[in-house]
Image: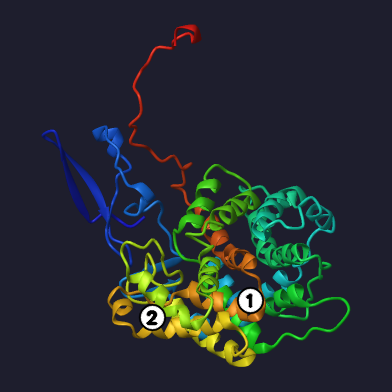
């Protein structure tokens, strides 16, 4: 913790209470209220914790007003333009950019752990064939502690390191298996001669009957999607992972909890919701109708994939991903795909319509990632699993940081109770 340089004074019923204030390296000052209840006998009320810092962290910083996203101080556009996913994983996990030798060692360790325990193949058979891949992912990742119980001791630094590598390495394999299972195709084993993104695409789209070659443009777009979703500060799923880990739960259970939280349409399901909206629009000629509905305050319809809760001017991830979207659409063509035609036209309307510009309804990362994944050939049911495997390294980095934090306590939010006070039980015959 930084040293307290200022004090905030709180007056309650004629009594004054001084609260320490801390200045971060970036972002607004924070008021330390940890002793507020002990000293003043009151709680704070902050639904959604939108004004509350639940931890201190050195991993990711977001400035929504500036449209800035930094990982360990490095701007996201530089990382997405010059780096690749596993290098970003190393940066998030260890706090610095690796040397060539360190990166080679890290990539080798991840690559050598991409296979899953063979008995996990049988575990998949317990799911119905029409199960949503996210349901499968939550179950299988949660079950990893039964298959890899030699890396579940959160108090052992080596266990934590092994668990981190295993999760980063095996999530693409498990996600690809969930996809293959949902479409009735055989599982495809990972290959050590392919990079992280290419390996995932190969496991998803290859079949034993013929060779499959990954297009480098598509692999690069996939890698950028992974990078741009790797971490995003204390969002709902990351906070869920931290809350679960505060109880001492094993890392696989904590990541499964994060995946379950990510499944929500207001969080990781946003890009799926965006594509479902494009399907609802259907054709380019219907766009004006839906634009009018979006502008109508009395119409509940919302344009998904536009604007952002945190970013107020632009989503820095979207600017990077737009380039990949343009490259993929040019490579694959959109002339025979009405859905992608609608997406391209809707993008132009949103970028140029004064209403959207004024309301800051810019295309966000969910809009462009949805377009890319649709063009590649993924069904919308796979969008959130892909988000989950991308975000796994962020969750693990936050989990490791929390375990090492000497101030870590089990999460225990308070409440503003508005229910009944003390009542006497009435026997059933007298009610």
Residue position marked by numbered label 1 in the rendering? 102
* Residue 371 x/y as whole percent: 55, 78
- Horizontal arrangement in the rendering, residue 319 relative to residue 31 (left or right): right
Report the residue at 33% width, 42% height from top: 34
Res. 223 image quadrant: bottom right
Q: Residues within 10 Å of mark 1 (few under 14, many from 20)?
A: few
* Residue 127 x/y as whole percent: 76, 52
Report the residue at 73% width, 62% height from top: 178
Kind of element beneath mark 2: helix
Q: Return the residue found at the far bottom.
A: 330
Alpha carbons under labels 1 and 2: distance apart: 44 Å
Residue position marked by numbered label 2 in the rendering? 350
Who is closer to the viewer here, 279 or 286?
A: 286
Q: Nearer the viewer, mark 1 or mark 2?
A: 2
The answer to whether mark 1 and mark 2 are in CB contact below 8 A is no
Kind of element beneath mark 1: helix
Question: Quick one: label 1 or label 2, which is nearer the N terminus?
Answer: 1
Report the residue at 58% width, 67% height from top: 387
Callout count = 2
Q: Return the residue found at the far left.
A: 14
* Residue 376 x/y as whole percent: 65, 80
């Amino acid at each position: 913790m930084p040293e307290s340089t200022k004090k905030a004074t709180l007056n309650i019923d004629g009594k004054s209470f001084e609260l320490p204030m801390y200045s971060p390296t970036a972002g607004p000052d924070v008021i330390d209220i940890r002793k507020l209840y002990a000293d003043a006998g009151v709680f704070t009320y902050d639904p959604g914790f939108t004004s509350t810092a639940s931890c201190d962290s050195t991993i990711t910083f977001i400035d929504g007003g500036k449209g800035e996203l930094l990982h360990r101080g490095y701007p996201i556009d530089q990382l997405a333009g010059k780096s690749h996913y596993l290098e970003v994983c190393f940066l998030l996990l260890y706090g610095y950019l690796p040397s060539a030798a360190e990166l080679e060692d890290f990539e080798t360790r991840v690559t050598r752990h991409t296979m899953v325990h063979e008995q996990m193949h049988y575990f998949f058979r317990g799911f119905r064939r029409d199960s949503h891949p996210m349901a499968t992912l939550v179950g299988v990742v949660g079950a990893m502690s039964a298959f890899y119980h030699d890396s579940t001791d959160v108090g052992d630094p080596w266990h934590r390191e092994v668990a981190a590598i295993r999760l980063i390495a095996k999530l693409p394999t498990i996600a690809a298996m969930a996809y293959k299972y949902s479409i009735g195709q055989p599982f495809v084993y990972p290959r050590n001669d392919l990079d992280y993104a290419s390996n995932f695409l190969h496991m998803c789209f290859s079949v034993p009957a013929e060779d499959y070659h990954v297009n480098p443009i598509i692999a690069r777009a996939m890698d950028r999607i992974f990078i741009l979703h790797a971490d995003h500060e204390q969002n709902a799923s990351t906070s869920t992972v931290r809350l679960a880990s505060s109880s001492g739960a094993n890392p696989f259970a904590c990541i499964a909890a994060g995946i379950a939280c990510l499944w929500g349409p207001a969080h990781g399901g946003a890009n799926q919701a965006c594509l479902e909206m494009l399907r609802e629009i259907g054709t380019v000629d219907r766009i004006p109708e839906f634009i009018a509905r979006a502008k109508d305050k009395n119409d509940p319809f919302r344009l998904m994939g536009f604007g952002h809760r945190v970013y107020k001017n632009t989503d820095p991830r979207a600017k990077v991903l737009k380039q990949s979207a343009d490259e993929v659409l040019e490579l694959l063509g959109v002339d025979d795909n009405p859905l992608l035609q609608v997406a391209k036209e809707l993008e132009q309307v949103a970028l140029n319509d004064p209403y959207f510009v004024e309301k800051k309804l810019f295309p966000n990362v969910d809009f462009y990632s949805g377009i890319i994944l649709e063009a590649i050939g993924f069904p919308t049911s796979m969008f959130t699993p892909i988000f989950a495997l991308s975000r796994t390294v962020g969750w693990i980095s936050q989990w490791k940081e929390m375990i090492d934090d000497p101030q870590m306590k089990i999460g225990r939010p308070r409440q503003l109770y508005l229910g009944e006070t003390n009542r006497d039980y009435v026997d059933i015959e007298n009610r």
